[in-house]
Amino acid sequence: MSLTAEAVKARARELGADLVGIARGETLNRHPPDPRRPQTPERITLEDSRSVIVLARRILTGLSRLKGSDDRHKQYSTELILADLEEISLKLIYFLEDHGHPAITVPPMHFDPPSYDPGGDSRGPLSLPHAAVEAGLGTLGLNLMLLTPEFGPRVLLAGVLTSAPLEPDRPLDTPLCLGEACGRCLLACPGDAILQWALDKARCAPHASPYGFTYLTRHLEQVVKAETAEEQLALLKSKESFMVWQSILRGVGVYSGCTRCVDVCPVGKDYEEIRDVQEEIPERTPEKETRLAELARRAEAGDRGPHWAHSARWIQGPGPS
Ligand code: B12
Ligand code: SF4
Ligand code: SF4
């Protein structure tokens, strides 16, 4: 049964996707973001990865208007958006399979077990921001997140691989990020984790994933190491245990922590709806400002730092594939 790219995209939008783009599996196979640890569609399924459909759900405007970097309300709603994306992917897969094309999801938050890194450099089966660039949804920013013309970085992503031979989208050929001359993400980052076209993942992870696996293991370690049975019982009944329980129950704060770099980015038509709250950046410090000014000065002179060349394809936009 023949199925067009337009029909698939229309169905994805009907299911709730805010943005949808399509890349050829072969293009992603040829351009793994980190060739030393390749994340490619063919490694997930050789048979059914001819097309890669990338879905985006926008982050709620109300959430981007909150200023805290550890806001439980924000964490809860962000997890609901991730769950929504999972459901959209699943229903899209049934649609594809009902039309005779086997398909499989690339989960929005999932690490390949062999890639687990307590320092934050774990890898998904595919890097969704890079896949989204190839599918024409946007380009990467100074912090290496996907920026889109519609919502800037304020989107969460999911992917679907399918055997269907769908017409791919044309990647953007102009960068969206305003670069070192902007650097608002760097100024807002509470972990001071944003470098020049790179991210210090170990510094970001405790903020991005405040109640994740590391929080759980650290707490359990304290319980195990407590000197008396009374201390152990007190730790079992502590607020920390409650946070672990609540996070396991509803996902709150497991993958949905800090979004300061996301909230303050001026790219995206939606920024007008949050500018009044986010224009001021309380996390600015003289040290950050000096470092950013130095980066801007060097960028002006043509020096984009040690990480630029490696990611240029996705920062600038790969152009037609
Ligand atoms: C692991 C992970 C994390 C880790 C590591 C982040 C990372 N970029 O890898 C931590 C915990 C730090 C993290 C943080 C956050 N994350 Co996260 N995370 C993921 C996850 C599950 C896997 C990422 C992955 O596989 N990366 C792959 C590697 C290759 O990417 P990379 O390191 O950026 O690659 C470049 C560099 O490594 C460099 N490089 C590589 N090798 C070499 C070698 C040399 C020599 C050099 C110089 C450079 C270099 O170049 C590469 C190519 O550009 C994805 C989901 C997914 N499957 O994509 C979500 C995802 C990327 N995260 C997301 C989000 C929203 C966040 C947070 C905002 C937290 C939150 N509240 O949700 C922060 C944002 C941090 C930031 N500024 O990027 C979204 C991003 C959406 C978007 N608009 O882009 C995703 C897609 C989840 C989703 N379903 O939407 N995350
Ligand atoms: S998610 Fe927070 S800690 Fe991580 S890079 Fe963005 S602003 Fe920094
Ligand atoms: S805040 Fe500025 S520098 Fe950072 S990603 Fe957005 S446009 Fe780029």
Image: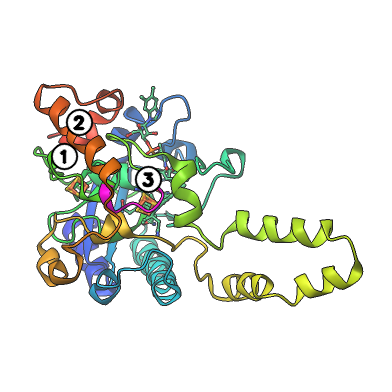
Q: Quadrant of residue 268?
A: bottom left
Q: Is mark 3 within 8 Å of ligand 2?
A: yes
Q: Which residue is mark 1?
A: 179
Residue located 25% across and 27% down the image: 308
Q: Residues within 10 Å of mark 2 (few under 14, many from 20)?
A: few
Disc 1 beta carbon < 8 A from ligand 3? yes
Q: Is residue 109 visible?
A: no
Predominant SS of the magenta segment = loop
- At label 3, which amino acid type do we have? Asp
Residue 294 - label? 2
Q: What's the residue type where badge 1 is placed?
A: Gly
Q: Earlier in the sequence, mark 3 or mark 1?
A: 1
Residue 202 horizontal/vertical position (percent): 49, 42
Q: Which residue is mark 3?
A: 192
Secondary structure under the numbered disc 3 in the rendered image: loop
**Residue 291, image x, y percentages:** 26, 35
Instruction: Find residue 63 and name its label.
Output: none
Q: Looking at the image, is 168 positioned above or below residue 76?
A: above
Q: Quadrant of residue 69?
A: bottom left
Report the magenta residues as a range.
187-192
Towards the viewer: 287 or 15: 287
Residue type at tag 2: Glu
Question: Which label lies toward us, 2 or 1?
Answer: 2
Q: Residue 143's x, y, as percent?
A: 29, 43
